[in-house]
C-alpha cells in the first residue's frame, strides 16, 4: 500500500510540473514578438528539459501553441502561442500577431 501511495504522489508531482511548465512556456511565447526556437525556450523557462519538451508537445497537440518549421538544419522548429479558439469556427485557432521570422531566434 505504501508503494502505491508513493507512486501516486510521484505521478501527481509529475503532472503538476508538466502543467506549470506548459503555462510558463505559453507565457514566455506570448511575450515574444516572433516565433522562438526550442533552445531559447529552454534557456528562458526554468524546468527540466524533458518536462519542457513534453509541455511544448502537449501545447502543440492541444492547439495552444503552433510549431513552425521542418525540424531540420536550416529550418528548425520554432514555436508561437495561439490565441483562444474562435467559438464561431468550432475549435479553429488564430495565431497572435507575430512575425514567424527566419532569424536566429
Image: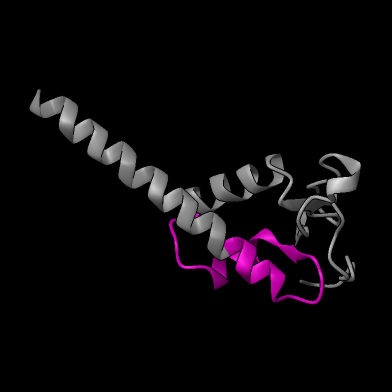
| Residue plotted at (46% across, 67% down) | 46
Quadrant in which residue 39 is drawn: bottom right
Q: Is residue 93 left or right of residue 46?
A: right
Q: Position of residue 17 (x, y in %)?
A: 40, 52
> Does residue 44 belong to the magenta stretch?
yes
Q: Is residue 81 above or below residue 61?
A: below
Residue at 18 percent of width and 25 percent of height: 4
- Counting the numbered discs, the total is 0
The image quadrant where one finds the N terminus is top left
Q: How is the model colour-coded?
A: one colour
Q: Is residue 14 left or right of residue 59?
A: left
Q: Is residue 43 above or below residue 70?
A: below
Which residue reaches farthest top?
1
Residue range of the region highlighted in magenta in the rendering? 25-49
Q: Position of residue 34 (x, y in %)?
A: 82, 71
Is 95 contained in the magenta span? no
Q: Quadrant of residue 35?
A: bottom right
Taking the image as shown, residue 96 lies to the left or right of residue 13, namely right
Residue closest to the eye, 70 or 2: 2
Is residue 74 placed above or below 8 in the rendered structure?
Answer: below
Q: Between 62 and 102, which is closer to the camera in this rendering?
A: 62
Position of the C terminus by quadrant: bottom right
| Residue at the far front in the pictured view | 88
Task: Point out residue 72 in the picture as x, y percentages from the top left corner.
Answer: 80, 48
4 left or right, relative to 21: left
Q: Residue at x 80, y 72 (%)?
A: 104
Q: Position of residue 26 (x, y in %)?
A: 63, 62
Q: Residue furthest left?
A: 2
Amino acid at each position: 500500500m505504501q508503494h502505491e501511495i508513493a507512486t501516486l504522489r510521484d505521478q501527481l508531482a509529475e503532472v503538476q510540473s508538466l502543467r506549470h511548465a506548459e503555462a510558463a512556456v505559453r507565457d514566455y511565447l506570448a511575450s515574444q514578438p516572433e516565433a522562438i526556437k526550442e533552445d531559447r525556450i529552454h534557456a528562458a523557462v526554468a524546468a527540466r528539459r524533458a518536462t519542457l519538451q513534453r509541455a511544448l508537445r502537449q501545447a502543440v497537440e492541444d492547439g495552444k501553441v503552433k510549431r513552425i518549421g521542418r525540424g531540420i538544419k536550416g529550418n528548425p522548429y520554432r514555436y508561437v502561442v495561439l490565441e483562444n479558439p474562435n467559438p464561431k469556427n468550432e475549435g479553429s485557432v488564430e495565431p497572435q500577431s507575430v512575425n514567424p521570422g527566419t532569424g536566429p531566434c
